[in-house]
Amino acid sequence: MVEKTSHYFARGNTAHGAHFLYKSAFQGLNTLYILTGPPGTGKSTVIGSLANSLLEKGQQLQYFHSPLRPDELDGIIATELKVGIVDGRVCEGISEVAAGEVLFVDLGDALDNSLILPQQLAAIEHLRAKLADAYSKGYETFLTALRIHDEWEKFYIENMDFVKADQIGQQFIQQLVASQESNLSKDVRHLFFGAATPKGAFDFIQSLTAQLERRIFIKGRPGSGKSTMLKKLAAAAENKGIEVQVFHCGFDPNSLDMLIFPSLSTAIFDSTAPHEYFPERNGDEVLDMYAHTITPGTDEAYAVEIAAIKERYSAKMKEATSYLKLAESIDSQIKVFYAAATDFSIVEKQQLEIQSNLDELLNSLAL
């Protein structure tokens, strides 16, 4: 059974600022609709409505969620139609995507600017400045948390058997890469399975791996070689031209957290907090990098120091999350001004026009 929906993020609030993967995630489309217009003019709502209609017609969909509000959408891809629809305001890099046809739809056409009073414009500008400041402080605090995380990793890196770690990596390269046929036309696709949100860490690991036959849960401590091994696996797959989905860490996008090999129905992923899961069915297995590569007794030898670092790290992560909560609140206030001045009957007409185009495409494929 082919799963009809899959859920991702392609932007993240990270320790290195706002990070976007849309250029990779949306590659290879025949048609790309880019919705433009101020916040509050209905872009996410239109995308959601179009998604529902396509799903009702039996189409396979990829959902790309907002890290500010995971219940809202940044975009979708109708997989079989090779059609993407995105909120151009938040999808940085999307205009660089190589698609057969790129169509801009300005929902700002439904906005009556005369309904926004001068004092309201001033309030919007003030809120925009506050929003930028909230994001800036959030990213700065995430970066501080990452530096604390580096301190945590040091204890394990200094007690790691790098030869053994490399042997484990080579074993999985043989299993997952060397055994497959090369196909140099395959592109490596970069995505996020999770994100830092105003409610804390959020991920779609379970839904993304539910239909896979094999799931490898990597356990270990910070600095025990999980991401390094995944990077070596990803590089080997790319060099051989094997299809692989590369999932970056939503906290530090320079690190990798998961690889999915579709042709092998296999996922291998970092199964530690804040995305810690455990085997629950046939085909699940654990790879414990701490047990295999770290000097026994390391946890106990540095228990006091590590506990202090964990506490500092947790405090900074909570602080950074509070700035995202503030950003969400400010963004909502900005939306109210624009929504009040938007004629949503015009937005509905724009939505119906896109829907009509999609229906024509569906009918043509059915013939």
Image (tube, helix red, strand yellow):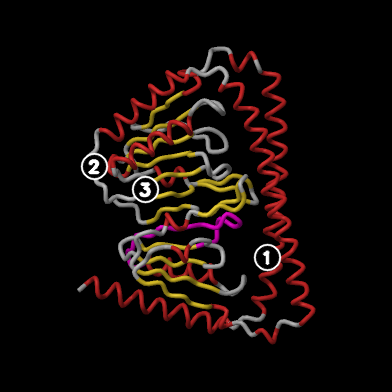
**Residue 73 visible from this viewpoint:** no
Q: Residue at x 37, y 42 (%)?
A: 260
Q: Which of the two labelled residues, at mark 2 and mark 1, occupies the earlier sequence position?
A: 2
The stretch in magenta equals 56-74
Please report contact status of discs 3 and 2: CB closer than 8 Å, yes or no. no
Q: Residue at x 29, y 44 (%)?
A: 241
Q: Splitting the image into 4 quarters, where does residue 242 fall?
A: top left
Q: Is residue 365 magenta?
A: no
Mark 1: which amino acid? Ser
- Residue beneath disc 3: 188
Q: Residue at x 50, y 72 (%)?
A: 35
Badge 2 density bin: few <14, some 14–19, many ≥20, Cα 10 Å: some
Q: Secondary structure at mark 3?
A: loop
Q: CA distance from mark 2 to mark 1?
A: 48 Å
Mark 2: which amino acid? Ser
Q: Is residue 357 above or below residue 86?
A: below
